[in-house]
Image (cartoon, rainbow, N blue to C red):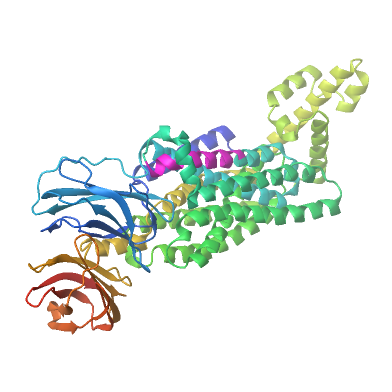
Amino acid sequence: MTTTAPRLGTAVARLLILAAALLGTLLAGAAPASAHAALTGSDPRDGAVVATAPKEVNLTFSEQVAMSADSIRVLDPAGRRADTGEMRDLCSGSVVRYGVGLRAGLPDGTYTVAWQTVSADSHPIAGAFTFSIGAPSATAVALPEQNAGGGLVGGLYGIARYLSYASFAVLVGGGAFVLACWPRGAGVRPVQRTVVRAWLTLTVATLAMLLLRSPYTGSGELSDAFDLAGLKAVLETKTGAALTSRLLLLGAAALFVAVLFGSYARRTDPKERKDLAFGLGLGGTVVAAGIAGTWALAEHASTGIQPGIAMPVDILHLLAVAAWLGGLTVLLVALYRAPSVERSAVERFSKVAFGSVLVLAATGLYQSWRQVGSWSALTDTRYGQLLLVKIGLLAVLLGIAWVSRRWTQRLADPTPTEAGDEAESEEAGTADGTTAGDEAGEQAEAEEGMALVGAASEPGPETVAESHPDPERAAQLARQRAAVATARRKRERDADPERAGLRRSVLTEAAVAVVLLAVTTVLTSTEPGRTEEEAGRTGSTAGSAAVPDRPVDIRLPFDTGGVDGKGVVRLSLDPGRTGANALHLFVERPNGKPLDVPEVKVALTLKAKDVGPLPVAPDRIQTGHWSASGVQIPMPGEWTIQVTVRTSDIDQTTIDKNVKIG
């Protein structure tokens, strides 16, 4: 019994429903987009109770962030602004710290610190915590329930991101499939439509992201998408520059598509066609790499460790994904909509896909190490868990691809007679301005023509054209007979078990690829496992803990009780780890101006190991600034830093703070 291919509508509907169900399950459990940057410390820290009102509130982040004048807000128990709105950049070396000044004379009670910013990899982050002056109190502050990047705007922005990735893959992979695997496909109308629609989708999605960027990282209100001031601010950011560059490169991509499906498709001279293919391949590769670079420039690859290596690797990864999954999409369209696809074309794509998988494996391994960093992060963080899901889907995809390859090996090329018939049908269609794919899609009209002219007994199209007195009617009958012949060959082709098996396997492969691409999109907006673990380790001691390889930076108010006895000591210990460290100490008045004191002493104690106190005698550099080099920290742990400040012959005080030194 002959095996027949499944009907396109039924098969596609079933697999797309399955893909949508898997995608919905995935996204239903997805939290709003986190980011590469994380809050690693604050002063005062969350839940702290301080005796006197601090002069400012400082926040420390794991990576660089973009701060605006309103990024940090401090609210008093009644919900009124307690900060001055004056943002201070306190970044130093590898320390990413920002602060906002507080108003003088703040009463006792619980204060709320709400912050919102954008990480260097383009994703918005936000949070809030409280501290108390004197003693905790009730507070009337109600923080917004919606997380940064959430709500309707966040959902629309996420859809645009997914569509941009998918359409980029189809645009680049479709063009590569035609040039490298199936040059005859440049003249096939369904293939042309698929690639052109991918270009349109990518352009519209990029415009949508550009308009939604301001409310996505700010207010969350959809109406702000058309705020010109917000759009201007977006254009000045790294993400805005990347999206604008993508639009410009899409203009070059439009020229590539026009030449590919225009001049190249019409070329008949082999040498001219080869030369044009070389030019298209070179130019298309440059444009595709440029578009891929707009993602690398603005997202995870541009921040964190080794960005100089990570960005080219990310571009290669995206191009490999496009060559495989985009080519797979166009192959699926060709298998269902084109008159025929030669076995040689499928075999060439199989080699391209194999090379893409090798590139994906190498680049994916590096990206996984860079973003995860440890086995515990692979299993205990959301990023690591999504990565495991992606690896599982990739394994399934490779298994289905292996099945497709076996069907390809059994697939026979059309016989010379069939190939001649198909060429004749294509010529007949071209004479009327249509393609064979269009004729196959008009089977109902063809069958009607068959009834009119008598399929079994009528002479060929040329005979009909010559014998019929009405030339227009003769041409119509000739076209109908050609369409009937095409439909008949399509039915015979559908009855080919090898071709039907290949169609089913490629369709299944494409459905799994849809979900795989969705997981990849979620991964790009999820906080990497390495950052999440690091933030978790420092979260319990935020404000007093030192992040490994980052300086200890603490602030200690003091009051010796005498004249000019009040002030603040700011102490920095760099690099804040075991071994030799540089100590800088600043003594300031309550108004922030330097305070000259007769003597400052520092001592370090590790109580858990009975080490210390280790005395440090800093040298006076200038008014209010003391320094010491080569301060030795013999071992890691929870160290107590004691600072003794003497403001007169009889007035002095000792203040201390615990810090974790790695």
Judging depth in this view, the residue of 279 and 513 nearest the camera is: 279
Report the side of 315 relative to 627 (left or right): right
Judging depth in this view, the residue of 117 and 562 nearest the camera is: 562
> Would you identify the image quadrant in which residue 636 lies?
bottom left
Residue found at x 23% / y 67%: 554
Q: Quadrant of the N terminus?
A: top right
Q: List x then y, in percent, for residue 183.
A: 75, 49
Q: List x then y, in percent, for residue 345.
A: 70, 51
Report the side of 547 relative to 358 (left or right): left
Q: List x then y, in percent, for residue 149.
A: 37, 44
Residue 135 falls inside the magenta stretch: no
Q: Is residue 86 above or below residue 435?
A: below
Magenta stretch mostly in which secondary structure?
helix
Which residues, given as a range, are shown in magenta? 200-218
Judging depth in this view, the residue of 289 and 613 nearest the camera is: 613
Instruction: Residue lying at the far front in this picture: please name it.
Output: 563
Q: Is residue 238 above or below residue 376?
A: above
> Would you identify the image quadrant in which residue 359 lies?
bottom right
Viewer can see residue 3: no
Q: List x then y, in percent, for residue 561.
A: 7, 67
Residue found at x 62% / y 42%: 199
